[in-house]
Image (cartoon, rainbow, N blue to C red):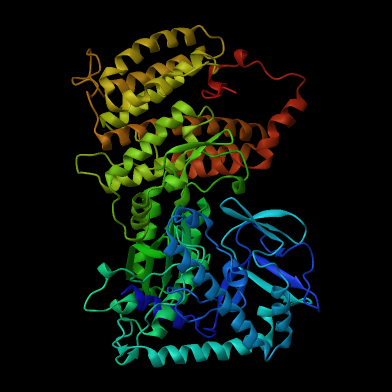
Amino acid sequence: MLLKHLYDYAHSRNLLEEPAFTPKAVRWIIDLDANGNMIGSGPVDTAEDGRRGKEFFCPQTTRAKHAGGVSEFLVDGITALFGLESDLKIVEKKSGDTNWHTARQNNNAAKKNDYWRQITDCAVVHQSLFLLKKFVSSLPVDAPPFIRRDGNAWKITTATGEEKTLGSENFTFRINGNLLLEDDTVRSWWRERHSAEVNVSKASAKRGLCIVTAEPNQPIAETHGVKIMSVPGGQVSGASLISFDKDAFSSYGLSKSLNCPTSEGAATAYCTALNSLIKGNDTSLRIGGTVLCFWAKDNKTAGGLFASLLNNPDPASVSKFIKSPWAGLERELTRKDLFIAVTLKGCSGRVAVSHWIHEPLEQAIENFAAWFRDLELGIVPRNMPQSDIDRPLSVFRLAAATTPLKRDKGLIKPDMDKLKADNLQAIYRAAFEGIAPSTMLIKPILDQFRSRLIGDSGYKPIYDESRFALLKLILNRNRKDSDMEIRPQLTADTYDAAYNCGRLLSVLSEAQKRAHDYGLEGAGIVERYFGTASVSPSSVFPLLLKLNRHHLDKIRKSPKYGVHVAYLENSIRNISAKFRPDGQGLPPEFPRTLDLQAQGRFALGFYQQQAEDERSRIAARVLAYLKETDEPGYVQAIALQQTGKQDFYERINQIYGSQSFKDWPRIKAKKTSAAPDKNKLPADQLDLFDHE
């Protein structure tokens, strides 16, 4: 069970050596001098990111907070320190409920008293803490001078005099430069107090069989005191994975967390494990409203492998992983090891488990290698540093292809706040479990694609590898025997009608652009007709073929592109021939309608035709560069072109991204007083796809 795996993780990683302390973000430090007077206009802001604050190992109490009136030691919010209401919005909402207000005020007062009672107790061993009481006693009754109410929010003046909005953030104290929560004497006192709290809790706890460890006669935790932090959608103060606070959730007379009998030690262990996993860059991935945690039971480095390939899968590392997924791992040990992954999301004070898996580590690695093989797609190289290119196969980029779009500062971007948890979960499961995502995921992918074509003037489909890689994986994993298999490169020999319709639209679009010398104003045929063509080809393509005659006539008369018309005509003729039932003499018969999967193949045919044309254009430029600057390299590249397309394009990509290729046009321009007239070059020396 999941809790047992978390319990084992906490013990195997030695996370319970200091149970009295836990990592917490502390936003505000109140600086006091040796006389207990505050230094500066207000507290010091520790937040480098402007939100959370700096993280410290802070004291954590084991006492139950659900009933109210309980504070943490030294580090807590404005209610514990000053008795102020932290949630002004709920106060306004409950304005007519006198009983609620009375109970709330009593709870806030009790929490403040508890905080300062602990300070007084610790001052016996560290007398400088009496300065804290001196400081707070000098403050006005309603609020400190550096905090003021502004409607339904609190404003705080910082040490530098800047005013900021105060959230649910923690405060602590520093006296004469000594941060008390890091003071050895204070920490030793708290360890003893924490141990006493644990003993009291154990003595008063009901005893029974622990559901996690299966050990009998254990003190059962009434509440699981260690809060799980930083779960998207959860409270800033933390949330609980297991809790029962309504009669409907109780059974057999059991209340609170007794419905899931967990020993106090096991409860602390699994909560501590989750906090460690969520915090670790090698063990978690946060996208949208969820956080994914993953780890191997014994192998402590496996999590880093998965994290790097999920977050930052650059082409070189992916290629290396596909070829040798076991590099750096002992194959025999992976057969005995276990891989666990859990997806969490917050629901205010609770943490919900969306999905979790456990499988042999060997199987997880094999599934992951298959994931990248199924995502493999021939991509168009870019003439820029690799570090400037987003990783198209990262889970974030793949998930972003399934969301609606939004306009942000003039740019059109995926709205990750509207990412559906089910879509993200399908992507995770496809990677870790090797399952086929539902074909229903095709719809949001295509919906966003159509929206980009219409609304994003700067959008270039050939650089949208994430969308089409995910589309390829979904189609191939859901493929029937009668459906074509989508290959990484263009499949020119297929008779799949949907795929070839997409290819045909791409070539017709290229003809239109060339007819207008790549200066077409307004929407082209792709922007106007892609949506209809991908659903009902027969209603659009006869019109587009008729329109294409005018485009070809215009190209034929062009001194710049006239030599290209034969290629375009042949491409259109060859694709159109696949729609003639008897081959010759008949007009093409296009499908009346396409189902969702066929629409996906249409989009991939369109993309792969455009990508292949662009790659050919780039290859022509690189070959011209080699022929002029590196004759042996040119001969070698031609040999690769004849023996293997993949090796050829890998070589082209390397040269295309080199600095010497980028400098070539500038150096060439210096050598000649004027650029050569393309219109006077022989046809065999023209770059068919050169339109710059």
Q: Nearer the viewer, residue 51 or 677?
A: 51
Tell me which residue sits at (29%, 45%) in the image.
476
Q: Quadrant of the N terminus?
A: bottom left
Image coords of residue 329 (percent x, y): 45, 72
Q: Residue furthest right?
A: 34
Position of 501 relative to 287 (above/below)? above
Q: How many marks?
A: 0
Do we see residue 404 in this rendering? Answer: yes
Image coords of residue 457 (percent x, y): 52, 27
Image coords of residue 641 (percent x, y): 48, 38
Tell me which residue sits at (63%, 82%) in the image.
119
Do we see residue 283 in this rendering? Answer: no
Tell me which residue sits at (27%, 44%) in the image.
439
Image coords of residue 351 (percent x, y): 40, 65
Position of 273 relative to 509 (above/below)? below
Position of 185 relative to 502 (above/below)? below
Q: Quadrant of the C terminus?
A: top right
Choose top left, top right, bottom left or bottom right for residue 54: bottom right
Q: Nearer the viewer, residue 516 or 108?
A: 108
